[in-house]
Image (cartoon, rainbow, N blue to C red):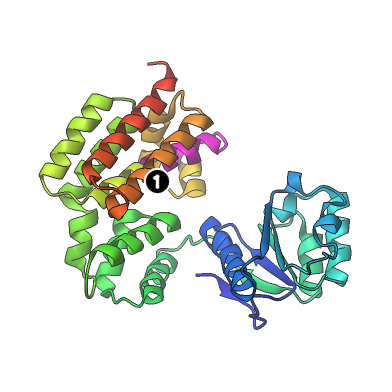
């Protein structure tokens, strides 16, 4: 859960989101954008990376408009901004423009600390987005996710979900959303077990493993068996998403021992070894194609299409084709 300072005005001139938990950083931006659009539906949103914010760019983005439009300017990885751009941002902090909210996302380490200190000194609203490395923190996060939806979940159900999903907050948030959408009443341990453990977990991840390995026929066979034995389609889309994301995360990580990568990526060491074998030859474009296929399948199984099984088959084939760029 992101922690906020006493200055909790979402439309404060400057919001500083500090930490390395991507989901919480994204939500910090989304909250500001939602508040801005509630005040002005035509709010202009600019979401920028350090290479897109060159010296002089901030001045252009925050210059007065003839139409006095509201604007949100989000700057990702602010610790990586060039020295000249940092000067621009520090100057802006001294006199923020009206109707504009600047959101600085900063990792919080020693790099770029001067900008971090300057934003705090200027009175920026601050949102803490730390990595959740402790199981107790992830358990608290799951409980808060259920509370935010207005639904109840037993303590045993929350613990079972953390045990089944692991340390990826996006996956935990997605699992809560799926359970809330599919299950009426209080979510208990039996419900979580039906969706995320035992036979269902094994069969859905078999589908994902075969798909990311480029073995389309075997993946389709496993998919049909899973559906025939009562595995929920959303369980399969979740497994496909985890499989593709694991490849994307590991392919962009620096080399190292499995134990080191496990700590960095929040995966158990045994999974690092397996994903390394699965990812050989995958390209960034292939990962992007596979993620789009998963997103389309997820929409299809949640009512966006007439045939959830066809949506899943289409996704499995698309992922397997993307995996074939490995030269098999």
Q: What residue is drawn where x is 23% and y is 45%? A: 307
Q: Residues within 10 Å of mark 1 (few under 14, many from 20)?
A: some
Q: Tell me: residue 58, above or below residue 82.
A: below
One can see residue 129 in this view: no
Asked which secondary structure carries label 1, the reply is helix
Q: Say whether residue 63 is left or right of residue 315.
A: right
Q: How many marks?
A: 1
Which of the 4 quarters of the picture holds residue 13?
bottom right
Q: Main secondary structure of the magenta part?
A: helix
Q: Residue furthest top?
A: 327
Q: Quadrant of residue 60?
A: bottom right
The answer to if 256 sits in the magenta stretch is: yes
Q: Nearer the viewer, residue 259 or 123?
A: 123
Relative side of 275 to 157, left or right: right
Q: Is residue 131 visible?
A: yes
Image location of residue 225, percent across then percent down: 13, 38
């Amino acid at each position: 859960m992101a922690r906020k300072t006493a200055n909790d005005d979402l439309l404060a001139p400057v919001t500083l989101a500090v930490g390395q938990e991507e989901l919480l950083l994204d939500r910090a931006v989304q909250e500001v954008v939602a508040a801005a659009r509630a005040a002005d539906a035509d709010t202009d949103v600019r979401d920028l990376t350090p290479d897109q914010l060159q010296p002089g760019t901030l001045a252009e983005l925050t210059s007065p408009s003839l139409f006095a439009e509201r604007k949100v300017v989000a700057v990702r990885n602010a610790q990586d901004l060039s020295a000249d751009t940092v000067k621009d941002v520090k100057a802006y902090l001294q006199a923020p423009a009206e109707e504009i909210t600047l959101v600085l996302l900063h990792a919080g380490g020693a790099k770029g600390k001067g900008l971090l200190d300057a934003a705090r000194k200027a009175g920026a609203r601050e949102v803490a987005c730390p990595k959740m490395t402790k199981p107790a923190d992830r358990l608290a996060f799951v409980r808060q996710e259920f509370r935010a939806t207005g639904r109840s979940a037993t303590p045993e159900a929350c613990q079972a979900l953390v045990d089944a999903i692991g340390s990826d907050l996006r996956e935990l948030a997605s699992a809560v959303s799926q359970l809330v959408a599919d299950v009426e009443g209080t979510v208990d341990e039996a419900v979580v077990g039906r969706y995320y453990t035992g036979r269902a977990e094994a069969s859905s991840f078999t589908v994902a493993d075969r798909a990311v390995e480029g073995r389309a026929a075997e993946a389709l066979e496993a998919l049909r068996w899973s559906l025939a034995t009562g595995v929920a389609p959303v369980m399969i889309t979740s497994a496909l998403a985890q499989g593709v994301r694991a490849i994307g995360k590991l392919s962009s990580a620096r080399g190292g021992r499995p134990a080191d990568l496990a700590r960095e990526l929040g995966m158990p060491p045994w999974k690092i070894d397996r994903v390394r074998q699965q990812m050989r030859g995958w390209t960034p474009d292939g990962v992007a194609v596979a993620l789009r296929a998963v997103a389309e399948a997820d929409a299809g199984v949640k009512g966006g299409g007439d045939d959830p099984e066809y949506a899943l088959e289409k996704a499995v084939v698309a992922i397997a084709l993307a995996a074939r760029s490995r030269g098999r």
